[in-house]
Amino acid sequence: MNITYFFVHGRQKRIDNNDNFAKEMYYSYFHFKDKYPETSFVEFKEPMGVFGFILKLLDKYLNKATKLPFFMSNVVNYSNFKTIKNSDHVICAQDRIAISLLPIFKIVKIIKPNLKISFFVMGLFNKEEEKKVIKSLRSYFIKSICKQTNNIIFLGKGEYDLAISKYPFFAKKSHLLPFMVDDKFWGHSSNFNFETKSGILFIGNDGHRDYELLVEIAKRLKNHQFTFVTKKFMYEKLDLDNVKVFDGSWGNELLSDEELRNLYSKSKITIIPIKKTTQPSGQSVTLQSMCTGTPVIISDFPGLWDKKDIVNHQNIIISEDNKLETWINLIERNYKNNEKLESISKEAKDLVSKKYNEDFFNKNFSQIIGLNAS
C-alpha cells in the first residue's frame, strides 16, 4: 500500500531537528507508516521558473474570484504528478492542498481511476455567503474537488452541517471526525496544582481569532500577566507591560512543542476569543491546553466542534458573547477559584483521554478511508 500525504510545511523540519514533538498535525501519518512502510509525505515548495510564475498569477486571480485557497504554484509540478500517479491513496491535510492539486487529480484519475483521495476540511465551506465572488466559478471548483475525492473529512460539526445542507449529494463521502491531540506528549507533564500556576495564555494565528478583543482584555486586566503566542503582532508593536509576545506559528517553530507544552502547563488559564464562524477555530489549542491541565475560556460560536460533550463550567468555560465586560467578569471570577479550575481541568483531561486521543483518531480515520486499523 503506497500512501502519500500532502502537507503545507513544518513536518520535515520537526522530523529532521527534533524527535520529541506532538504528532497530531501529521493526521495519522506515523500510524500508517508503521503499517505500510511505503507511506511518505510531500510539502509545499516555493514556485520556480516560468511555469511557477504563471501558476502564481493564476492562483492570485482564482483566489480573488472565488475566495478559495488556491496555491497551485506551490504544489502542481511534474514531480508531484509522478508521486500521485504511483500512489494508491493520497491524503491532503488541508482543503487548500486538495483544491491546489485539482489539476493533477483530474489527469491522474483518468489514468488511474482506482486512486483513492481524502482531504480534511479547514474552512472550505465557511465563506458560502461571501458576496464578492463569482459564485458559479466557486461552486464549480468545490463540486470538482468533491467529485474527485473519495472522503471529505470534517473536524467540526458546524462546518459539516453547513456543507451537507449546501451540497447534500456529497453526504455519503462526507465524514465527521473529531480532531485529536497527541495525549502521550501533551499529557506528559500535566499540571493540576493551581497554587503554582499563574498567568493567562493565548495561542493562535488564524483570521477567526478576535485579536481586538484579546488586546482590550489585556489592557483592562493590568494586574494579570499575559503570554501571546501568535504572529499577529509581528509588524505592530504591542506596548503593554503585562504582555509577553512570542512571534510564532506552528510552521516556523520559533517555539518547540516542548517549550509550548511548558507554557501551557505553567499558565492558569488559556483564553480563546473567536469571531462568529462555522470553522472549528481554536480546536487544537483547546485540546492541547486541556491535555496539559490548563482550563480554557472560549467564545460560544457556531463552529464549536462538540456541543454535546464539551460542557460549560464542567470541562471548559464558554463566554456567551464577545463583549469585553463578559470576558473580564469570566476571567476575574474564575482566576482565583483554584478549586473550580482544578475540577474543570481534570474533567477536561478525562474528556480528551476518552474522545480526542491519538488511538481513537487513528482507528476511526482508518475505518473512514478503508484501511486496516489494527
Image (tube, grey):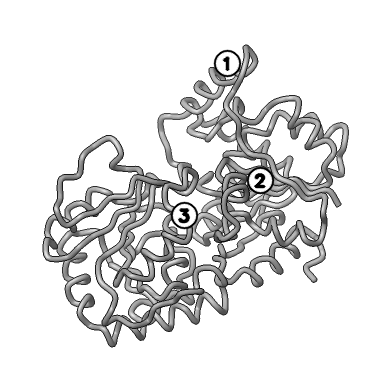
* Residue 260 lies in quadrant: bottom left
Please state if 278 lies on the left or on the right of 320 as rendered: right
The disc, 1 or 3, on the residue closer to the chain's N-terminal end is 1
Circles 2, 1 touching at the beta carbon (< 8 Å): no
Relative vertical location of residue 183 with respect to residue 132 in this rendering, above or below: below
Q: How far is the residue under mark 2 from the one under mark 1? A: 24 Å
**Residue 269 is drawn in which quadrant?**
bottom left
Q: Position of residue 197 (x, y in %)?
A: 29, 75
As displayed, is residue 276 above or below residue 319?
A: above
What is the x, y in percent for residue 101?
A: 67, 34
| Identity, as a three-letter code, of the amino acid under mark 2 | Cys
Query: Which comes before the other along the chain, label 3 or label 2?
Result: 2
Q: Residues within 10 Å of mark 3 (few under 14, many from 20)?
A: some
Q: Quadrant of the C terminus?
A: bottom right
Q: Which residue is mark 1?
A: 53
17 and 244: which one is in front? 17
Three-letter code for the amino acid on which mark 1 is drawn: Phe
Dot label at residue 92? 2
Tell me which residue sits at (60%, 57%) in the image: 19
How far, Cα to Cα, is label 3 from label 2? 24 Å
Dot 1: within a 10 Å radius of its alpha carbon, few (fewer than 14), some, or many (20 or more) residues? few
Provide the residue designation for mark 3. Answer: 256
Height in image: 124 above or below 30?
above
